Image (cartoon, rainbow, N blue to C red):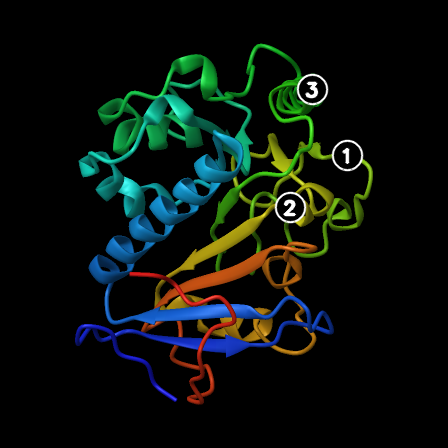
Amino acid sequence: RQIYQNQKQWYQRRVRVSRMAECPACVQVFPDNVQLGKRLCSFVKDRYDEAIDARGAFHIAVSGGSLPKFLQGLSKRVDIDWTRWWVYFCDERHVEAADPDSNYGALKQLLLSDISIPDEQILKINSSLSVGEAAKSYEQQLSERLPSLELDLALCGMGPDGHTCSLFPGHPLLKEECLMIAPISDSPKPPPSRITMTYPLLRKCRQIAFVVTGESKVPMVLASLNENPTTPAGKVRPASGNLFWFLDAKAAAGLPHDKTPCPTPLPE
């Protein structure tokens, strides 16, 4: 069943992921990146409203890559109290903030420089430490700021190989069950040294949303959104929260065409 709202050419699909029937993925497909970005910003605003009403603060984790560009529309919102935002990074390269590879640097350029989140509420990597110590420091500071470790929202991307955060196919970190933030010094994608959120932390999230675009992602989208996902991204799901996938039409080209309402429909 296809859903249209205000004649917008986008639709939602319900897709069961793996054997966790209690956590179906709500898959939203958009005709282009402009529509996807607008909807994603509205989605983030709705999650912010829920968090403020329930807990008085909004704790969000953001990935790098192309994801920050989809958040630029948030800077135009006048109905957000940015002082209530706490920002973290799903993964971060072990580089200085000014380095072109810095996820923080990318988010700062595209969003943070245009809004007024207090700098102390943006948790950045301490690149002066070794990558192992930087991961320990990040986890400690995260625990101090958010003792429950229950992020309100994690925005994740997915690479052409199916990786998400800095969790790569076949890497030992896929089996990490103790560390919440782990170091990685042998990333198959440069730069090799990074820190990353692990599955145990991601499972604690109240909401997780993937943003995936482009025809090169079709095989990995299919491998992630089936009954037995084989990609690192496909194995990410909150233990008791909601899971969303925002796709453009190109990335969703290989998905089945049966369309039914999401378990948690997105409000206008």
Q: In the displayed structure, does residue 120 sit left or right of residue 25? A: left
Report the amino acid beneath label 1.
Leu
Q: Earlier in the sequence, mark 2 or mark 1?
A: 1
Where is residue 124? Give x, y as percent.
50, 20
Q: Earlier in the sequence, mark 3 or mark 2?
A: 3
Where is residue 117? Give x, y as percent.
35, 21
Which mark is in front, 2 or 1?
A: 2
The residue at the point 54 percent across, 38 percent down is 90
Q: Which residue is mark 2?
A: 202
Report, in whole angstroms, how far the alpha carbon at label 2 lies from the one at label 1: 11 Å
**Above or below — where is 258 with respect to 195?**
below
Location of the C terminus (image quadrant): bottom left
Report, in whole angstroms, how far the alpha carbon at label 3 lies from the one at label 2: 16 Å
Query: Can the viewer see residue 66 in this picture?
Result: no
**Above or below — where is 195 with respect to 246?**
above
Q: Earlier in the sequence, mark 1 or mark 3?
A: 3
The residue at the point 55 percent across, 60 percent down is 243
Q: Foreground: 70 or 145?
A: 145
Q: Which image quadrant for residue 16?
A: bottom right
Q: In the displayed structure, does residue 117 sit left or right of residue 24? A: left
Q: Which residue is mark 1?
A: 179
